Image: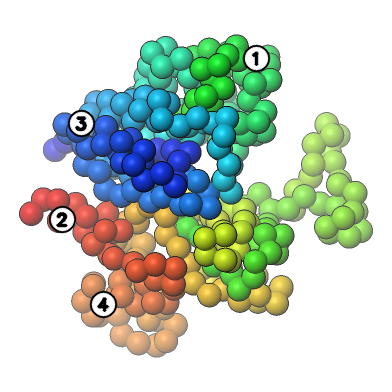
Amino acid sequence: MNQLIECVPNFSEGRDMKNIGRITGEIERTAGVRLLDVDPGKATNRTVVTFVGVPDAVCEAAFRAVKKAAELIDMRGHHGAHPRFGATDVCPLVPLANITMDDVVIYARNLARRIGKELHIPVYCYEFAARDEQRRNLASCRQGEYEGLSDRISSRNWKPDFGPDLWDDHIARTGATAVGARNFLIAYNINLNTTSARKANSVAFDIRELGRVKREGDPVTGKIIRDAEGKPVYEPGLLKHVKAIGWYIEEYGIAQVSMNLTDLEATPMHVAFDTACERAAARGLRVTGSELVGVVPLKSMLDAGRYFLNKQKRPTGIPKREIVRIAVRSLGLDELSPFDPDKKIIEYILMDKNK
């Protein structure tokens, strides 16, 4: 059987559909890959793209897309709600079938090397592809975002893994890119009945594994507690393998808790949802629904549907499509826009492509 990997590049353009189409067109024209999902966001000014295929083809498609993005996106004028530091902000590779993470790491580093050398773009390797432990966390690589990049790439500790480390007009336009090898994750947003990003952040800090900075006295304005090395001390959050921040999404007129669920066995989607409901309620807020960015495995939807059926003491021995429908309604995945399982669930997408 063929080896399969997934690639989920995030491009710093979520408003110009023509340019988004030009970027994804490079992927569609590459033999050996299938474009599964294109998810633009106006407020984040960011598009999450998902495609799968055999490793060499996926890396070629990714390279072509990064090249086109560098031609079309000028970071000097980019603004959006999501953290970012480059035209192609991140480009993770994910093992799907008949391939080990160690193999994917090799592909990721080779792709990073090629982007740095041929496209003159600073590249940081993260997650399993990281060559330095302090670069394993994407947030560490992207600290300071685009605005801090000119100083960072030439600093001793944060020179890029590949590509140039001296700021010039070309890099000012393209920014940097993070290329990684990681496990499958779900990008999942919880909708709140507030416009306050501060309140959304409070819920996010309750939930995320990192938690919140410890302070003396007042938990918001008190003096930050630091360790012997001067680093902030954190009080851990409730859920393992969850990254989260709060933000306001102007196009929807609501604040969200934006999460990455990086281990779906440790923290499934429905657990993240129910925990967000509990923490929001404790702060006088209400969860009104949720939003899935990109695609999701069928198992996650079935697990969620069965979870809510069990809570209602209803039988779970019903058709899978009906269980998925229960999950969609229970999680409020159709609050902001219609949720089409045939376009959002990986197995259904691939089934349709194989017809």
Q: Is residue 111 left or right of residue 138?
A: left
Q: Earlier in the sequence, mark 3 or mark 2?
A: 3
Label 3 crowding class (10 Å Cα cut-off): few <14, some 14-19, many 20+?
Answer: some
Residue that mark 1 sits on: 154
- Residue type pointed to by label 3: Thr
- Counting residues from the start of the chain, the first of labels 1 and 2 encountered is 1
- List the residue tagged with mark 3: 30
- The kind of secondary structure element at disc 4 is helix
Residue at screen point 64% across, 21% down: 150
> Which amino acid, by three-letter code, is at mark 4?
Glu
Label 1 element class: loop
Give the spatial CA distance, label 4 vs label 3.
36 Å
Residue position for label 2: 351
User: Which residue type does callout 1 highlight?
Assistant: Ser
Q: Measure the C-alpha gap from mark 3 to mark 2.
A: 20 Å
Camera-near label (1 vs 2) is 1
Seen in the picture, residue 62 relative to 20 is either above or below; the reply is above
Q: How is the rendered protein coloured?
A: rainbow
**Do labels 4 and 3 touch, CB within 8 Å?**
no
Q: Real-space Cα distance between discs 4 and 2?
A: 18 Å
**How far across and how far down the image is residue 225, in percent?**
86, 46
Image check: 24 left or right of 148? Answer: left
User: Could you tell me residue 280's position as x and y percent?
Assistant: 64, 71
Residue hosting label 4? 322
Mark 2 surroundings within 10 Å by alpha-carbon count, few (fewer than 14), some (14 through 19), many (20 or more): few
Query: Could you tell which of marks 4 and 1 lies nearer the N-terminus?
Result: 1
Left or right placement of residue 347 versus residue 264 in this view: left
Which of disc 3 and disc 1 is earlier in sequence? 3
Say whether disc 4 or disc 2 marks the residue closer to the N-terminus: 4
